[in-house]
Image (spheres, rainbow, N blue to C red):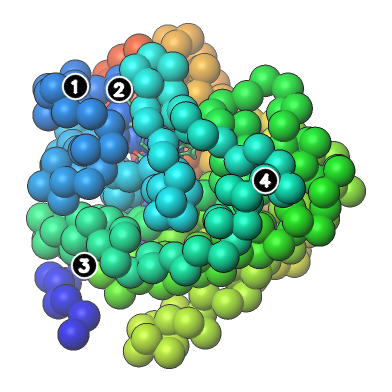
Amino acid sequence: MAPQFEEMQNDLLLRTARGERVERPPMWVMRQAGRYLPEYHEAKGGHDFFECCRSPEIASTLTLQPIERFAGLIDAAIIFSDILVIPQAMGMEVIMVDKKGPHFPEPLESPDDKQYKEVMERKVDVKESLDYVYKAITLTRQKLRGRVPLIGFCGAPWTLLSYMVEGGGSKMFIQVKTWVFRYPKESQALLQKIAELCVEYLALQVVAGAQMIQVFDSWAGELSPASFKTFSLPYLNYIADHLPARLKELGQEPVPMTVFAKGAWYALEDLCESNYNVIGLDWLQDPAAAYKIAQAKGKVLQGNADPGVLYGGREAITSVVKQMVTGFGGGKQGWIANLGHGITPFVKPEDLKFFFEEIHKYAGSS
Ligand code: CP3
């Protein structure tokens, strides 16, 4: 049976995501549980990154840290985990190298390689292999006691394929470009397989207690507009088109869905035609221009301050907040305040607090 949770005290995020008029914009930031917080390093202790993801106790503690530090200002929690747990569930080894990022010791070589066949043929049980994520979600919902909604997430097929083939972060994307342009059919077969796993994984996160979901396509901007339409958009759409039906089968209500296709500024209209409720924006988008398009299509936007502004001190922060509040129509409808990508290390938590306070100040009064 699905777990039971306390009544919500703050559902501003969910109301906004459904398109309702609200008293002020909800706010949270991507990577809000992370290295800029001294308490993150303390709670993580000597544990390896993926060990923290696999421990419901540690993952829930880390998820709650920004909620506790910014109590009364922050309107959402996002489960502490990583997009790379899907490749792990598909049988690939991924390690997190300190100060460098994720590393796959054996990335996918080419579709002619036996590894590709193995990955394509392997039956992946996301229920069992990612059970620790669902346990972390349920425990986090219990510890939240209805303070704010909990967001679940996954990586988009294109971004996950990039990591699986490149073996980590990349500057030139030589391997994955070789894949998609030399072996489009085999690439698309794998993208489809990943998309199907994403649907099941997200559905089970909702069963466990996630109240909204976000799909992170962090490398979308590496694709041309035409290639995005071939290698990313169909799989993003597959997820949004199939998740609600899968939730229904599992006896669950639908949840609001967000897509964040970083760098794909050219795809805003297409994404506004999708079944996602919320479109995440990076800082390449002008708030007012994007808001006009999204309002016409009945979509909610999320974003989009340059995370780098948080290094710039109070005047810079006030200025970007004012631009966002004005651009996103005043903040009473269709806008979830956030950064345009994850918060970066060395940002002072006090400066993030000031960012939240300024949004309250400029978008909160009626
Ligand atoms: O937003 C949150 O607070 C929830 C947690 C979260 C993490 N990763 C924790 C994390 C989320 C939503 C992610 C998603 C994720 N992971 C993405 C998509 C979002 C994005 O930033 O584009 C990507 C591309 C990854 C893969 C990944 N994980 C990279 C590239 C890195 C290293 C670089 C970096 O920015 O740290 C990670 C590590 C990671 N994931 C850390 C955290 C807190 C840092 C780990 C550490 O050093 O302690």
The x and y percentages for residue 96 are 37, 28
Mark 2 residue's CB less than 8 Å from ligand 1: yes
The x and y percentages for residue 134 are 26, 62
**Residue positioned 31% across, 60% down in the render:** 129
Q: Which residue is mark 2?
A: 35
Q: Which residue is mark 1?
A: 41
Using the numbered discs, state the Cα–Cα distance from disc 1 to disc 4 in whole angstroms.
40 Å
Q: Residues within 10 Å of mark 1 (few under 14, many from 20)?
A: some
Q: Earlier in the sequence, mark 3 or mark 1?
A: 3
**Residue positioned 56% across, 36% down in the render:** 107
Q: In this orientation, which residue lies closer to the viewer: 63 or 146? A: 63
Q: Are marks 2 and 1 in contact (CB under 8 Å)?
A: yes
| Disc sitting over residue 113 in the figure | 4
Secondary structure beneath dot 1 equals helix
Using the numbered discs, state the Cα–Cα distance from disc 2 to disc 4 in whole angstroms.
38 Å
Q: Answer left or right for 24 relative to 146.
A: right
Using the numbered discs, state the Cα–Cα distance from disc 4 to disc 3 in whole angstroms.
50 Å
| Identity, as a three-letter code, of the amino acid under mark 3 | Met
| Identity, as a three-letter code, of the amino acid under mark 2 | Arg
Secondary structure beneath dot 4 equals loop
Using the numbered discs, state the Cα–Cα distance from disc 2 to disc 3 in whole angstroms.
28 Å
